[in-house]
Image: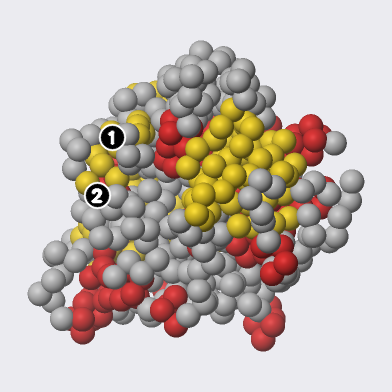
Amino acid sequence: MTGPSLHTSALPDPRQLIVNNGDHFDVVIIGSGAGGGTLARHLATSGLRILVLERGDWLPQEPQNWDAEEVFQKGRYVSKDTWFDKRGQPFQPGSHYMVGGATKMYGAAHFRLREQDFEALTHHDGLSPAWPLRYADFEPFYQRAEQLYHVHGLRGEDPTEPPASGPYPHPPVAHEPRMQRLVDDLKSAGLHPFHAPSGVLLDEANMAFSRCRKCNCCDGFPCLMHAKSDAEVIGIRPALAAATVSLLTRAHVQRLLTDATGRSITAVELERDGEPMRVSGDVVVVSCGAANSARLLLQSANDQHPQGLANGSDQVGRNYMFHNSKAMVALAHEPNTTVFQKTVSINDWYLGDAEFAYPMGNIQMTGKTNGAIMKGYAPLETFLMPGWSMDRIAAHALDFWISSEDLPHPDNRVTVDSQGHIHLSYTPNNQSAAKHLSDRLTGLLERLYLRKHLVERQIYIKSAMSIAAVGHQAGTCRFGSDPASSVLDLNCKAHELDNLYVVDTSFMPSIGAVNPSLTAIANALRVGDHLIERLR
């Protein structure tokens, strides 16, 4: 089956939005982020009737998109959800419910997992399990994902880089002078800094016609120019160019209903603007993010599935992961005039070194901070500091993001109470690796710049609780060959249901130490191939 060609710039036809109560589709996709949005785009040319259900609405293009005070201090685009920690204390997660999901706010850093991340990998504080598939199984889909999401990079710079079947589809984003100086300094210290793989609609050879302007409102902001390769721009908008694809926004799915045998999903119950609706599909795909996908399956318990859908193994919601991440600011003597800072990454300590023979993780630059951003990150610590003083500090800052692997543990889990609230029980682990990586960066910068002036800051908005940082969440519905120890089969279909799939970072048995977005996108393309074959 064939359909119309799709273009990234295609705008949605409002007629696509008409969905009636009781309508039936070939595929219903719940969620429009990296998994759901990519899958919708992939299936759009197949001729199948596709419905995407999105809990949020279109994110408005407005001046506040690039207002650091609105975004970082006031949390203008953060959800109003309340979750609860393992002590029953409420917190507001850094969730974003909108067309494109969390990708609207991400930094578009598109790393592949390393080959070793797919194998059993011993850490100082535990074991990262082997995947049921290996890197070679995902490599062709990584290549397609990089092409689809306009990833800029350069092969051969990163010593831990896995094999690739082709070059990056676009040249690396050029370093600005201060970042090039940092790269030179890192190389002089014996490291191998490389161009961070970045998904932006950028043409530096022809900037007059480039959608991306290399501004300082990318990482953590929604892009006012639609120049960031997010799941709305790359996935949903082009998908809606096909007459067979529909999108329903403000559609909060409440439950999935099964037939009497419990083997098939027969209806999707949702609320839209306070009104109940039902739709159905030959296949139902859950792509709500690791926590909310688990919530929906648990909330859909019935007589045939008393512990929740697909949960005969008692694995739904378990093994929640979100990276041991920390943002660190180095204050240098000279000003840092960089605008687009997120071009440098370091993996020299990803798998360990001679002094610590265990994986440590990844270092990359964050978007360039200013005073308003820093006050948003650490509101209590900076409450009495005027904005001008924070701007002066930020003007001298080199901003780093360090990530170590969060090891899966069955007791780090999502559960749901009788009111449908998420309870996230989480105990930090693998802290030795995180400390060693932090120490490596601190020691390096002290040697390079001869001054100890490094401060840690909170990363996420409006909460000092680390579990509020949900941007890199994964696990909860891991895939595998054994139904007793996994939720999904190798095609990400629930072992216990014939037409239920989960296509987001929930499927991941481990998270590695790099951003999970490209793996979610690659897996959506992989599962999309399977669904096209199945439904044909």
Three-letter amino acid code at disc 1? Answer: Tyr
Q: Which residue is at the front of the view, 120 or 406?
A: 406
The quadrant of the rendering that contains the C terminus is top right
Residue identified by numbered label 2: 91
- Furthest residue in direction right, as rendered: 1
Pointer 2 and pointer 1: residues touching (CB < 8 Å)? no
Task: State left or right for residue 107 relative to residue 463.
Answer: right
Instruction: Quickly name the residue at label 1.
Output: 426
Q: Please tell me which residue lies in front, 422 or 278.
A: 278
**Residue positioned 26% across, 42% down in the render:** 84
Location of residue 225 in the rendering, given as x and y in whole percent from the top left corner:
57, 77
What is the CA distance from the residue labelled 2 to the residue labelled 1? 13 Å
Q: SS class of the residue under badge 2?
A: strand
Badge 2: how crowded within 10 Å, few (<14), some, or many (20+)? some
Residue drawn at 37 percent across, 58 percent down: 79
Question: Along the polypeptide, which appears first: circle 2 or circle 1?
Answer: 2
Of labels 2 and 1, the one closer to you: 2
